[in-house]
Image (cartoon, rainbow, N blue to C red):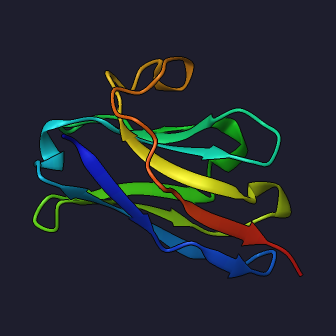
């Protein structure tokens, strides 16, 4: 069973930074494209970013372009989401998941189920 542990969330002031981690359990992440998603209260899951399994373009939703950076460390079996210049509208629970392909990842249910996620709250 493919499982993840998301971590790194917290409370941060507007303009601050957080680095989220997505650690895999029981399988090697480097074989799979991985997406980061978020769910704000009362809203559906939103695709935030995606990194392909091999070299290739990363994907970002327009609202985070230039502020968030997705990366992977295959040795640590972890995918990261560096979030800078955070805004109150970034407040949400953030999840990672295996996706079928980064192209169109935000419009399709991911391959893996949602995990526990990690809460990000941006507030002064």
From this view, report whether residue 22 is shown above or below residue 35.
below
Q: How many marks?
A: 0
Answer with left or right where residue 57 lies relative to residue 42: left
Residue 49 drawn at (x, y percent): 50, 42
Considering every residue shown, the one lying at the far right of the view is 124
Q: Please tell me which residue is depicted at 84% across the width and 63% down the height of the picture.
A: 88
Give the quadrant of the N terminus: top left
Q: Quadrant of residue 32?
A: top left
Nearest the eye: 36 or 3: 3
* Frontmost residue, 104 versus 42: 42
In-image side of 65 versus 57 (left or right): right
Which residue is at a point 48% across and 22% down the rendered structure image?
109
Residue 26, percent from left and from top? 12, 52
In depth, the one of 2 and 14 nearer the eye is: 2
The quarter of the picture where residue 35 lies is top left
Q: Residue at x 48, y 57 (%)?
A: 69
Residue for point 42% across, 54% down: 70
Asked if 84 appears above or below 70 in the picture, the reply is: below
Locate residue 82, reporting x and y percent: 49, 66
Left or right: residue 103 compared with residue 56: right
């Amino acid at each position: 069973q493919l499982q993840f542990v998301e971590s790194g969330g917290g409370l941060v002031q507007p303009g601050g930074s957080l680095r989220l981690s997505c650690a895999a359990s029981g399988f090697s992440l480097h074989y799979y494209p991985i997406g980061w998603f978020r769910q704000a209260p009362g809203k559906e899951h939103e695709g935030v970013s995606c990194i392909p399994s091999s070299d290739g373009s990363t994907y970002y939703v327009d609202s985070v372009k230039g502020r968030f950076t997705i990366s992977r460390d295959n040795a640590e079996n972890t995918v990261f989401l560096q979030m800078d210049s955070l805004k109150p509208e970034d407040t949400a629970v953030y999840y990672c998941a295996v996706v079928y392909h980064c192209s169109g990842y935000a419009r399709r249910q991911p391959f893996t189920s949602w995990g526990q996620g990690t809460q990000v709250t941006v507030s002064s």
